[in-house]
Structures are given as structure tokens and as C-alpha cells.
Image (cartoon, rainbow, N blue to C red):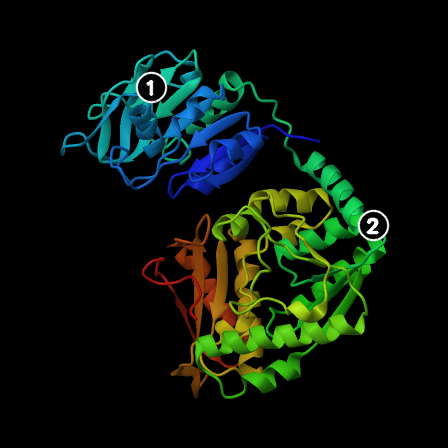
Amino acid sequence: MKHDLVLVIDFGGQYKQLIARRVRENNIYSEIIPYTKSIEEIKAKDPKAIIFTGGPNSAYLDDSPSISKEIFDLGIPILGICYGDQLTAHLLGGEVKKGSEKNREYGKTICHYKESKLFKGVESGQVWMSHTDYISKLPEGFKCIASTDNCPIAAMENEEKKIYAVQFHPEVKHSIDGDKMIRNFLYDIAGLKGDWTSENFIENKVKEIREKVGDKKALLALSGGVDSSVAAVLMHKAIGDKLTCIFVDHGLLRKDEGDQVEEIFKNRFKINFIRVNAQKRYLDKLAGVSEPEKKRKIIGEEFIRVFEEEAKKLGKIDYLVQGTIYPDVVESGTNGSAVIKSHHNVGGLPDDIGFEGLIEPLRELFKDEVRAIGLELGLDEDLIYRHPFPGPGLAIRVIGEITEQKLNILREADAIYIDELKKNGLYRKIWQAFAALPDIKTVGVMGDERTYDYVCALRAVTSTDGMTAEFYPIDMDILAKISNRIINEVKGINRVVYDITSKPPGTIEWE
């Protein structure tokens, strides 16, 4: 089934993925492509609407990103945002100038709208601006449909040609009713159908996978994370016993996580499931190693060796299945098949296993869409909304050298922390939360005895994509209860601290 397509043409904008997601939220399929694509390549994709992103350049400079003027003659509705607004004006004969202190706008400002299909149901109000240049003269055939105190042309339209452009960012939450504007463009101006749903995605993808695999076999490296879990269940729905999942338990997982993964996929979904208990193998390799990048490299290389050994035991396997999602494709800089994901920040899976091809059943989806598909397929909310977990696992949350004792201490502390966040209704409000065990011991007093035990650090952040993050302000009474439980229930910890560092300057993980 062919869906309506909206092309998001990227001119270097930091919000390109957010724009594409906003389109998807309206049940319309979107793809991001670079501005360097030719008009013929754009026409071949048969888009029903086009959105130009923002970008850091000045539209009037010769070396700035641009696009052929032919795009405006294709009869395809276009919405320009920020730089896309200025580029539209510049290419069509308007005038864009460098702003003075008066014309520059950064952050929240009040925008006044005039009558337009783009602003149907929208009252004048707050928008998010980020621009130095401004449109000083409209192109022929356009009229101004919005302004701010500092920006006389904050939006423009050519209603006949269905070309619209806004100086502000309707895709960000700080622009009040920005979602309505995007919806108005998609439905009222472009006349799109809105047929991109989780239900028809599953139906179409299952059919596609069955046709591709036929009587052949597929293999998936299952981590127990959201992406690989949803990929596994979707593939199993499509090809049943022709799929085998290998789960490498490296002993660096959270409390009871390995058993939970086995219960879900082997016992509940009845998937061909191989659990490789490689805990001792990993601990032996990591003995005496304290440098974070060296730990990551050892874990990644060992995973490749274990996976390779197990795959060869299975005989001829035709396809490798991978939980690539759309942000991976975008960040790889290609809309061709994404390269095999590097595992744990090192090289990818070995080339000599002899796979005929790669299947990426989720490569068109954003994370929120992957979660929706997972729920539709019957995976539990606890798994679908589980916080991100790094490939090297607890190895980078035990700071310094890894020992079995430290791992056990950290598992217990982390389990208590997460349990209390869930009990207090905070878990789903937080993007990522975890306990870390710094390589520090401090003096304490428990009962009448002096102790010399580890410090436990708690971390909780809010984020949308992990690129930036703010620490979550957990109530002090809740923190006190968590601290009390950890110190009383976990032998080996006598002090608990809470990390209030944002990213940047810190990272989310400690290593």
C-alpha cells in the first residue's frame, strides 16, 4: 500500500527530526532528505507535500545551502520554516537582509496572525524564534500573514500556488498551537489522507517480510531493549520458526533482566530463542580493566566473537535482522540501507558469517512509533517504556574496575531506586534513571560500628533525544526514602548522592 509522502528537505536544521515526527503524529508518512537531492530525485519520490527546514546560514550568500527554483513549479504544496522561509523569499525574488539588533529574535515572542488557511483555529500568541536575518520584501504573488513587533514579515503565503512560509518554528513545543499550523498545512492546504497508522504498518510490513524471506531463515541479535524486542516480535509474526534470536547474557544486565527476557521471548512468544550465558567469559576479559573506553571495546569485541560462534552452530542463515530505527538512518547520512550497526561503539557484526542480506523492519520508524508498534504486537508496557540502557550495561555504571561483588551491589541499589520511582509515579516522567557505583569508599556509622563502604550515585534526567538533558528534580522526601532503603537493604553501601548535572556539561552516563 502506497502512503502519502511528505518530504522534509534538510538545509542543516537542528529540528529536522522533530519536524518529521510532527508530520508522523498526524498519521502521515514523512522522510528527511538533504537539500542536495536533484529535482528529478525529488519527483521520483512522488511527494504530496514538502517542508523546508531551518538552518544556520544566510539565504542570500552564494555558498549557502540552496535548491533549484523548479521545485516551486511542481505544483506540490510547500511549507518553509525559518531558513526555509527566507530561502523561499530569496529564490522567488523577495529580499532577505541581515537584521539589526531590533530585527533579531531568539526565544519566545508574540506573533500576530492574519486570516489564512495556515492559521485556522489559531489565536495570536507565543512562538519560538531563532533568526538574525529577516525578509524585508515579499516575493511577487505573496502576501504577509503574520508579524511580530520586531519582524514585519513573520509568515507569508501564495495561496494560489500553495506555498507557505513562517519565520518561527511551529514544530517546537514553545510555539503555541504550532501543531495546529502543521496539521492545517497537511490536511487543509495539501489535502492529505492521514493513512499512516501502527495497524496498517504491521499489516504491510508482515506481508513485505514474508515475500522477502520466503522459505529462508533469519537471525536476530536480541538485547532485550525496545528496538530489538519489537523487531523480534514483528519478525516472528511474519515468519514464525524461520526466525532465531540469540541473546548474549554478558552478566552486565540489571537485576533479573536476563530471566525476564527469556520468559518473554522463549516462553510467552514461543520464539526460537538461544540464551548464551557468557558471564564468566566477560568478567575474565574485564578483570583489572578500569579505563572506560577499553571496557567498551572489550565488551563489543567479545559480543562479536560470541555471536559469531553461536551463529555458525546454526548452519546456513540467510538474513541478519537488525533493530535499526529511522534516527539511525538519518544520522548515518544516507537514505540507502543503513550500515550494520556498530555494537557497543565498536565495529559491526562480522562480514564472514555469510548472510545473504539485511532486514531492518523498523528502519522507517521513530522511537515513539516503535513503542506504538510494540504495544500493538502485545509487548508489555514495562518493556516498551523501559528506560534506555547502554550496550556495555552495568560495566559503565560500575566506575573503575569491574568485579562480581560490585555488580551485585549495584544491581540491588538500582532495583530499589527504580522500584521507588515507579511507586511514586515518576518513572514514566523521567527519560532515564539509574544508579551508579563510583570507585569511592567513605566512612560511615551504622549502629555502633564504623563502616567503610561504597558511595551510590543516583541519576535521573529528562530529555527528548539524549543529545541534551536536564536533571529531574525528585522531591527530597522521595530521595530520602530511596537513600534510606538502599543503605539499609544493600550491604556494601553507606552513602547515597544525587547527581544534579545537566548535559552539557556532563554526559548522562558516568562513563
Image quadrant containing the N terminus: top right
Instruction: Say which of marks 1 and 2 sits in front.
Output: 2
Instruction: Count neighbours of disc 2 (C-alpha within 10 A) and say few if under 14, some if 14 to 19, many if 20 or more.
Output: few
User: Which residue type carries mark 1?
Assistant: Met
Q: Judge whether 482 appears above or below 102 on screen.
A: below
Residue annotated with mark 1: 156
Instruction: Count neighbours of disc 1 (C-alpha within 10 A) and say few if under 14, some if 14 to 19, many if 20 or more.
Output: many
Please give the name of the residue rendered at 72% of the width and 74% of the height, measured from the top-left corner.
276
Please give the name of the residue rendered at 60% of the width and 53% of the height, measured from the top-left corner.
324
- Locate residue 224, reporting x and y percent: 66, 61
Where disc 1 sits, the SS reads strand
- Locate residue 138, reporting x and y percent: 27, 18
Q: Judge whether 320 appears above or below 4 on screen.
A: below
Out of 399 and 420, give the one closest to the viewer: 399
Out of 314 and 20, give the one closest to the viewer: 314
Q: Judge whether 400 appears above or below 214 on screen.
A: below
Residue annotated with mark 2: 214
| Residue 250 in view here | no
Is 62 left or right of 405, judged from the image as shown? Answer: left
Image quadrant containing the C terminus: bottom left
Out of 376 and 20, give the one closest to the viewer: 20
Is 302 left or right of 139, judged from the image as shown? Answer: right
Where disc 2 sits, the SS reads loop
| First along the sequence among labels 1 and 2 | 1
- Locate residue 338, reporting x and y percent: 57, 53
- Locate residue 285, reporting x and y percent: 58, 85
Quarter-of-image position of residue 208: top right
Please give the name of the residue rendered at 14% of the width and 32% of the height, measured from the top-left corner.
100
| Residue 479 in view here | yes
Separation of residues labelled 1 and 2 (CA atoms)? 52 Å
User: Which residue type carries mark 2?
Assistant: Gly
